[in-house]
Image (tube, grey):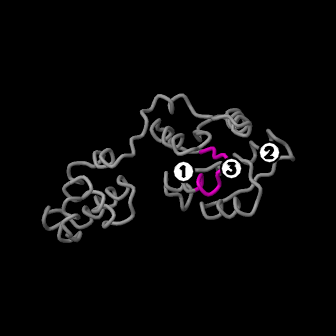
Amino acid sequence: MVRRALRESLLQSFGDSFEVLEAGSVASAREALSTSSVDLLLLDLSMPGMDGARSLQALRTDFPSVPILVVSAIEEPQVMRQTMELGAAGFLPKSSPFSTITDAVRAVLAGELWFPQLAASAPAHDNSLPARIAELTPQQRVVLELVCQGLHNKEIATELRVTEATIKAHVTQILHKLGVRSRTQAALLARQLT
């Protein structure tokens, strides 16, 4: 629905000389970028295959000449700021009126940046290891310590007297906050601080 609305808005504003390619996933967006001449990528942070900042960063690295205008229902200043720091050319909240969408696209195509005022007011994202560890809750830190000791989820659940599902949820959040994909990577990162 959002893609259709964006397409209609862009075609109405730019006319027939403006071709719009649609992609329903990160994989199909990559394919379009690889096989077509693309002037601008409108990227939804919630599209299938999107892995947040990691996917945005990979697209910027692999297709450096294509400006990316992030379109998202997430309107948190910190998220906007992070997309800015990762090289996006702009951030457009999905709640924006059609006239704003047109203005944002025109600005980014002209080589300008387009970010809501909120993005500038957000503190710079500290991606250092101590900052990522500091984002963990006290319970997540305990779980991470037990992961570092080599315990499995079931053993950690027994030790902390909670369900295994609770530990799985904690581990998932730990991996996300640390920006790693495995328990081993999380343990290696945590050991760097000791």
* Contact check, label 1 and label 2, Cβ < 8 Å: no
Q: Quadrant of residue 94?
A: top right
Give the residue type that dot 3 points to. Answer: Val
Direction from residue 163 to residue 97 in the image, left or right: right
Q: Count numbered badges in the picture.
A: 3
In the rendered image, residue 51, in percent from the top left (x then y), is placed at 49, 57
In the rendered image, residue 18, in percent from the top left (x then y), is placed at 82, 47
**Nearer the camera: disc 1 or disc 3:** 3
Question: Mark 2 or mark 3, which has the lower sequence index?
Answer: 2
Q: In the rendered image, which residue does mark 2 sit on? A: 11
Magenta residues, start to end: 59-70
Q: In front here: 192 or 30?
A: 192
Give the residue type that dot 2 points to. Answer: Leu
Q: In the rendered image, which residue does mark 1 sit on? A: 45
Determine the secondary structure under disc 3.
loop
State the separation of the CA atoms marked 2 and 3.
Answer: 20 Å
- The residue at 68%/49% (across/down) is 66
- The residue at 22%/71% (across/down) is 152
Determine the secondary structure under disc 2.
helix
Q: In the rendered image, which residue does mark 3 sit on? A: 66
Give the class, few, some or many, for how many residues have Cα within 10 Å of label 3's Cα (few <14, many ≥20).
some
- The residue at 70%/37% (across/down) is 111
State the separation of the CA atoms marked 1 and 2.
Answer: 23 Å
Q: In front here: 50 or 4?
A: 50
In the rendered image, residue 190, in percent from the top left (x then y), is placed at 26, 57
**Nearer the camera: disc 2 or disc 3:** 3
Determine the secondary structure under disc 1.
loop
**Nearer the camera: disc 1 or disc 2:** 1
